[in-house]
Amino acid sequence: MNKIFFNAQQQLRNGWWVLVFIAILALSRQLYKPTRDWLAGLGASTMQLEPLALVFLLLVSWSCVLLRRQRLADLGLALNSRWWQQLLFGTAAGMSMMAVIALLMWSFSAATFGINPKFQAADLVLGAYLLLLGAALEELLFRGFVFQRLIDGLGVWPTQLLFAAVFAAGHWENPGLEGSAKVVAMLDLALASLLLGLAYLKTRSLALPLGLHFGWNWAQGYLLGFQVSGYEHNGWLLPQLQAKPDWLTGGSFGAEASIFAVFVDCLAIWLLWRWRGVAQTSTAAEFKPDSTKALALPT
């Protein structure tokens, strides 16, 4: 019976840590709405309340790492100079990937671009605020505590494939997902999850996947003017989709539902796979994987 709960080092198994996280998360959901309503009653605006969901998820994650006698840094949130460098690099890389997609769409006459007359410079700042919060929330949820515990418990690729499926399924009901664009979008979202998971594994930090996620979405919505996962944004450019199949243009879901996004994601995964990486050993040495399935990535 003891082996069900504890590994050979008498540490709670990773599967149970996942259940601990889910239990604390469920408890936090009971507190979230009353807290939001209380802050709104004090005069907090909708924009001021945007970070609240991320704050709650951070507190849940922090509670779990404290129970494991670790720090937030061990979760991939070291916030040192290297962390910020990886965030900036990831942001630039994500923006570049989306720019390549747009260039390919233009080259194959799938879209043309003009200046959006309704665009204001303040939209870039607002977009950065909203999309950075959204990307941070998703990365902490999909590459945070649960992902890391399953990496230790199940191994790299079972966890990567599981989260790729969950990440894609999480967008299933988004607006604009229809026809051939739905098939391509699901494939691209799964590839994006593999890319972001690999970015974490190569650095053991959430900075690079966060930057990639944020840069991709911000460039897609607020620079190029596409929908982001089906949602409208007031971008600097105004794309005009041509009379081409949705699998080529992305339809009303956005450029990430274009076959060009699949190509760019595959290329990025290959480049990241080839990269040696800068992953560091966890400072909490007393916590070792409870399974030999935590496979090392080739360099």
Image: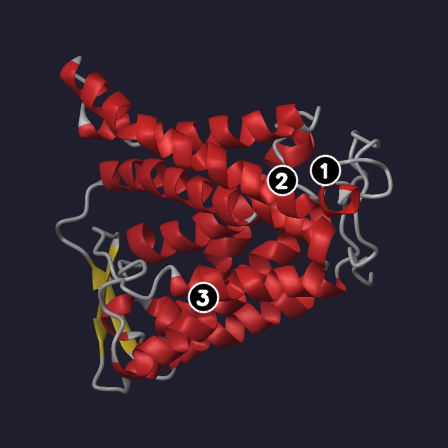
Secondary structure of residue under mark 1:
loop
Kindly identify which residue carries mark 3: 189
Residue 17 image label: 2
The residue positioned 23% from the left and 75% from the top of the image is 241
**Given contact means CB atoms under 8 Å apart, are the residues at marks 2 and 1 in contact?**
yes
Element marked by disc 2? helix
CA gap, disc 2 and disc 3: 27 Å
Tag 1–tag 3 contact (CB < 8 Å):
no
Left/right placement of residue 254 relative to residue 275 reads left
Q: Are marks 2 and 3 in contact (CB under 8 Å)?
A: no
In the rendered view, does 266 fall on the left or right side of 237?
A: right
Amino acid type of disc 2?
Trp
Q: Amino acid at mark 3?
A: Leu
Along the line of sight, the residue nearer the viewer: 36 or 247: 36
Q: Is residue 113 above or below residue 108?
A: above
The x, y position of residue 156, in whole percent, is 70, 59
User: For the residue carrying disc 1, how many other residues have a C-alpha within 10 Å: few (<14), some (14-19), or many (20+)?
Assistant: some
Find residue 12 and name its label: 1
Q: Residue placed at 37% from the left, 49% from the top?
A: 218
Which quadrant of the structure image shows residue 86?
A: top right
